[in-house]
């Protein structure tokens, strides 16, 4: 007797799994870009709305590094809060589907039957990998902090005379 890996037994399914992995990575990349730019625009809008405040701070003697640090700390707080919230909102459904399987037959009787004919269980369990959650959270947090640099630089380079005259 010889054991045959499932990839050789059902090569079409192996191709579909690989395609699904590539598709998931592509969607994750798109999602990361969207998150990064939404965060950039949020922080930039916050900085632009408080231009007068930063101008006054510079006029009374605040150093650019202090203003940069203020914006960076605010972004750090928002980034940590958003990452933690996303972590929880992602973990809850994942934990649920590790306990409660998804019935493939609910997508159509033919799908459940064909899975059983190929020797596969028609119930699909989610696999929770904490490492993936941590990596994704870390990547998103790093993107968020990178997107903070431009608004923080803009705030720290505020010219007091111009901002106070304009407003």
Image (cartoon, rainbow, N blue to C red):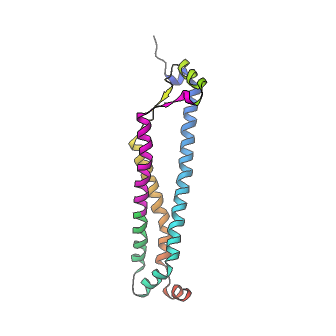
- The residue drawn where x is 51% and y is 62% is 39
Percent from the top left, x then y, of residue 132?
43, 44
Identify the residue at the far top of this view.
Answer: 1
What's the magenta bit mostly, secondary-structure-wise?
Answer: helix
Q: Nearer the viewer, residue 138 or 53?
A: 53
Reply yes or no: does residue 10 show up in magenta: no
Q: Position of residue 73 (x, y in %)?
A: 39, 68
Residue shown at 45% from the left, 42% from the top: 93
Instruction: Tell me where the magenta segment starts and ends, as one range.
Output: 78-106
Q: Which corner quadrant of the image does residue 110 belong to?
A: top right
Q: Is residue 91 magenta?
A: yes
75 left or right, relative to 111: left
- Residue at x 47%, y 71% (from the top left corner): 152
Q: Residue at x 57, y 25 (%)?
A: 11
Query: In which quarter of the view is residue 162 placed?
Result: bottom right
Q: Position of residue 91 (x, y in %)?
A: 41, 45
Q: Quadrant of residue 66?
A: bottom left
Q: Work out whether 164 lies above or below 94.
A: below
């Amino acid at each position: 007797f010889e054991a045959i890996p499932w990839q050789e037994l059902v090569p079409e399914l192996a191709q579909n799994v690989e395609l699904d992995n590539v598709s998931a990575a592509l969607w994750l990349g798109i999602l990361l870009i969207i998150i990064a730019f939404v965060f950039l625009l949020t922080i930039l809008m916050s900085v632009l709305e408080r231009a007068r405040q930063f101008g006054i701070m510079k006029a009374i003697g605040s150093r650019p590094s202090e203003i940069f640090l203020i914006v960076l700390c605010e972004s750090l707080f928002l980034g940590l809060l958003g990452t933690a919230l996303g972590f929880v909102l992602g973990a809850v459904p994942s934990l649920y589907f590790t306990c409660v399987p998804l019935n493939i037959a609910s997508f159509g009787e033919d799908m459940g039957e064909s899975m059983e004919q190929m020797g596969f269980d028609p119930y699909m369990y989610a696999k929770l990998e904490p490492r993936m959650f941590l990596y994704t959270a870390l990547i998103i947090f790093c993107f968020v902090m990178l997107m903070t640099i431009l608004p923080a630089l803009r705030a720290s380079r505020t010219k007091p005379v111009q901002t106070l005259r304009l407003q």
